[in-house]
Image (cartoon, rainbow, N blue to C red):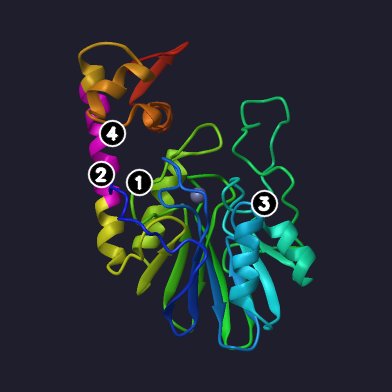
């Protein structure tokens, strides 16, 4: 896990990353968001897309509108509906008249365990992009790449003109992505990582952390890391039954206490995946070798 970069952070500034892409950092740093959510503006000068508008904080929305200037906003695009990504889509749509395009709303049972406080339940897209469908504007085409796992409705967007991939929270530049069951699904997450490994994107622009300049190498490393976690879990289970929380101090030495809950959920996501594959079994909240 990367330590935070030295301040001042470029919160609110529009940084040009390549001819078609600028990035604006939102003022929402936290143990889960690193320096904050990074909103991307894709434009060839004649009408832009805003990707992952971020939290609905006035300061951030003003920064985005300043960066966009007089240019029409063609689409507001969301990779997924965690609260640090999509809530600003509504005030931004109101102020620019642009449609909200991208991931599907998350279907949740309102009283079930999927009713997670971290989800933006008010997200209302004008157009949902399915895997392989594209949104285009003057000089740019953004094609959806379905990447369920971190959450079930997650999309990445491929900028066809430049070979960049906006990876949202599927692959981040500072840490492994958190997979929280039941909506987060490790089986899907691994499959989505493998799918990215087959692509030939030039660079990843994640919602948190620096751009990834050697994407295939990172994806291979992440797949290896997850498989190693899996082997660790099986090794501990070979010694006897465990609850998900029992693994955390053994597997995540030195982890910030604030992140222990996330680590436990990540272990649980692996256990569910291993259970599906017939390798482990559970009774109530205790797990053992199958
Ligand atoms: Zn995020």
Q: Distance from label 4 to label 1 (Cα)?
A: 15 Å
Please state the horizontal and vertical placement of residue 1, each as a whole percent of the image.
28, 45
Q: Which residue is mark 4?
A: 230
Q: Earlier in the sequence, mark 3 or mark 1?
A: 3
Q: Which residue is mark 2?
A: 225
Q: Which mark is residue 102?
A: none
Q: Residue at x 66, y 56 (%)?
A: 58
The reply to whether callout 1 and callout 2 are in contact (CB within 8 Å) is yes
Q: Quadrant of residue 270?
A: top left
Magenta residues? 222-235
Q: Nearer the viewer, residue 286 or 248?
A: 248
Badge 4: residue crowd in 10 Å (few <14, some 14–19, many ≥20): some
Taking 3 as reference, is 274 above or below it?
above
Dominant SS of magenta comes to: helix
Q: Tell me: is circle 4 under 8 Å from ligand 1.
A: no
Q: Which residue is mark 1?
A: 176
Q: Earlier in the sequence, mark 1 or mark 2?
A: 1
Badge 3: residue crowd in 10 Å (few <14, some 14–19, many ≥20): many
Left or right: 153 in relation to 122: left
Q: Residue furthest front?
A: 8
Discs 3/2, front: 3
Q: Dot 3: what SS?
A: loop
In the rendered image, residue 36 lying in the magenta stretch gets the answer no
Q: Nearer the viewer, residue 215 or 241?
A: 215
For the C terminus, the image quarter is top left
Q: Earlier in the sequence, mark 4 or mark 1?
A: 1
Q: Which residue is mark 3?
A: 87
Q: Earlier in the sequence, mark 4 or mark 2?
A: 2
Q: Distance from label 3 to label 1 (Cα)?
A: 23 Å
The reply to whether callout 4 and callout 1 are in contact (CB within 8 Å) is no
Q: Quadrant of residue 18?
A: bottom left
């Amino acid at each position: 896990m990367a330590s935070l970069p030295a301040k001042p952070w470029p919160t609110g500034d529009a940084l040009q990353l390549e001819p078609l892409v600028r990035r604006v950092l939102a003022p929402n740093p936290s143990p889960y968001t690193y320096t904050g959510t990074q909103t991307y503006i894709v434009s060839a000068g004649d009408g832009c897309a805003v990707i992952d508008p971020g939290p609905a904080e006035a300061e951030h929305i003003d920064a985005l509108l300043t960066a966009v200037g007089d240019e029409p906003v063609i689409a507001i695009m969301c990779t997924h509906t965690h609260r640090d990504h999509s809530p600003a889509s509504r005030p931004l749509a109101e102020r620019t008249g642009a449609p909200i395009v991208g991931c599907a709303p998350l279907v949740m049972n309102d009283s079930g365990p999927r009713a997670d406080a971290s989800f933006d339940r008010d997200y209302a897209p004008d157009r949902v992009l399915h895997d392989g469908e594209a949104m285009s504007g003057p000089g740019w085409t953004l094609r959806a790449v379905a990447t369920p796992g971190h959450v079930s409705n997650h999309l990445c967007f491929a900028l066809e003109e430049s070979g960049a991939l906006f990876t949202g929270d599927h692959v981040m530049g500072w840490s492994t992505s958190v997979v929280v069951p039941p909506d987060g699904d490790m089986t899907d997450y691994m499959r989505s990582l493998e799918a990215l490994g087959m692509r030939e994107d030039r660079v990843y622009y994640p919602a948190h952390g620096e751009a990834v300049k050697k994407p295939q190498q990172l994806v291979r490393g992440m797949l290896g890391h997850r498989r190693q976690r899996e082997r660790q879990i099986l090794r501990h289970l070979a010694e006897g039954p465990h609850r998900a929380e029992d693994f955390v101090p053994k597997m995540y030495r030195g982890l910030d206490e604030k992140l222990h809950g996330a680590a436990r959920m990540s272990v649980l996501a692996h256990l569910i995946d291993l259970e599906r594959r017939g390798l482990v079994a559970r009774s109530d909240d205790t797990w053992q070798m199958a």
